[in-house]
Image (tube, helix red, strand yellow):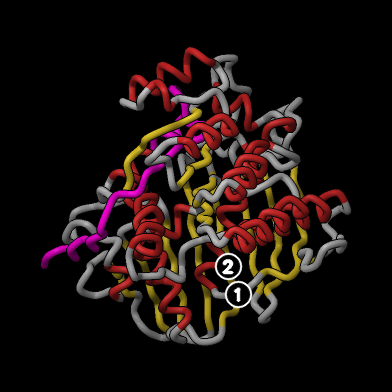
Amino acid sequence: MNATPRHATPRRLRLAMVGGGQGALIGGVHRIAARMDGRFDLVAGAFSSQAERNRATARELGVDEARCYANYQALLNGEAEHEEGAEVVAIVTPNHLHFPAALACLEAGMHVVCEKPMTLSVDEAQRLAEAVRASGKRFVLMHNYVGYPLVQHARELVARGDLGCIRSVQVEYVQEWLSEAPGPDNRQAAWRLNPARAGAAGCLGDIGVHAFHLAQFISGQRVSEVSAELFSAVTGRELDDNVHALLRFADGARGMLWASQTAPGFENALSIRVVGEKASLRWAQESPNELFFAPLDGPAQRLTRRDDRLGADIARGIRIPGGHPEGYLEAFANLYQAMSDGLDGDIVSPWLPGVEDGVDGMRFIAATLASSRAAGAWTPLQTTEGEP
């Protein structure tokens, strides 16, 4: 079996990055993903607010010092004057900068790749959605877990009716890395635990929103109401580090979501079970190359990641033959690949997360926070401006 050939594009897209300086995990992940299929060239950046770290990052990455900028506005001004300026901007900053940076990039005529959560509020999310529509530019929200081929296949199984009517969705995203108070040099923890930079949601905004998006993505159903409790297991922590939520879906399914960053023994345990009237499926991010499908009164089937057994759109995201593991970096790369296909090719991938997914995520965060403050009262997700 041979892996599906890469989709040829006429040229490489010019990429700039906001954030992602030395020591920032996610910036490096984005850079690897963007260059994996030869679709993007990193040509400019505003990598850090610290001048020396910013310049050092540019030198390390081979970015021209003249195109290493102090901030995103300087980047946009400088690239506008450049004969071959950046076309796409990846925003990999702490949460509080997502909205202003993305809005400025769209208004400057740039396509945007943005980390989640998309904004700090529903109002900001709706304003950004309006800006995307007005700009005519592409906006990709980096819900990277939907880049796994078997996640996309799970969604396809549900959509074509193999599970029948969906009854239940159980999703978990559980980690251990904040089980104790972090040391003073832990830069990743420092901003995630700071409400001024992370927003009002801690674990909820960092990983809970990933679990929420995955539940909607695979099930094909929208969450309509949530009953939730947030708490901090570590004394003195300002933001939540645990999320327990019951979910009601608009089409009748029920669900549960658990997210935690204080669960010893769990590294990056994102998993989901979807139960229908005819069958169920389950998938776990730590074993991403297998999907289990279990029909009623029949043996469970272990499905593996093979390009000759998956749909053509899914198979484009498979780079090597079955039995050769692919994982986290490739899932990220599949979002960059799909974006490139839509910008410089003739293939539009309907599964690619966009600004409306970001609006949904902020509605979920707002409803979950409100429910927890109301002792777990069932709280509807906001659907129009002005709703609670």
**Image disc number at residue 132:** none
Image position of 197 (left or right of 370): left
CB-based contact (under 8 Å), mark 1 and mark 2: yes
User: For the residue labelled by badge 1, is the local secondary structure a helix, a strand or a loop?
Assistant: loop
Residue located 48% across and 12% down the image: 52
Residue 117 visible (yes or no): no
Up-down: is 111 above or below 48?
Answer: below
Up-down: is 115 above or below 287?
Answer: above
Q: In which quadrant of the rendered view does residue 171 lie?
A: bottom right
Q: Which residues are magenta?
A: 1-29
User: For the residue labelled by badge 2, is the local secondary structure a helix, a strand or a loop?
Assistant: helix
Q: In which quadrant of the rendered view does residue 220 lie?
A: bottom right
Q: Residues within 10 Å of mark 1 (few under 14, many from 20)?
A: some
Up-down: is 9 above or below 234?
Answer: below
Picture coordinates of residue 128 (x, y %)? Answer: 67, 54
Q: Residues within 10 Å of mark 2 (few under 14, many from 20)?
A: some
| Marked residue nearer the N-terminal end (1 or 2) | 2
Residue assigned mark 1: 221
Residue 97 visible (yes or no): yes
Q: Is residue 86 magenta?
A: no
Residue 324 or residue 346, whichever sits in front: 346
Picture coordinates of residue 312 (x, y %)? Answer: 28, 74
Q: Is residue 19 magenta?
A: yes
Q: CA distance from mark 1 to mark 2?
A: 5 Å
**Image disc number at residue 216:** 2
The amino acid at mark 2 is: Gln
The amino acid at mark 1 is: Gln
Residue 245 or residue 25, whichever sits in front: 25
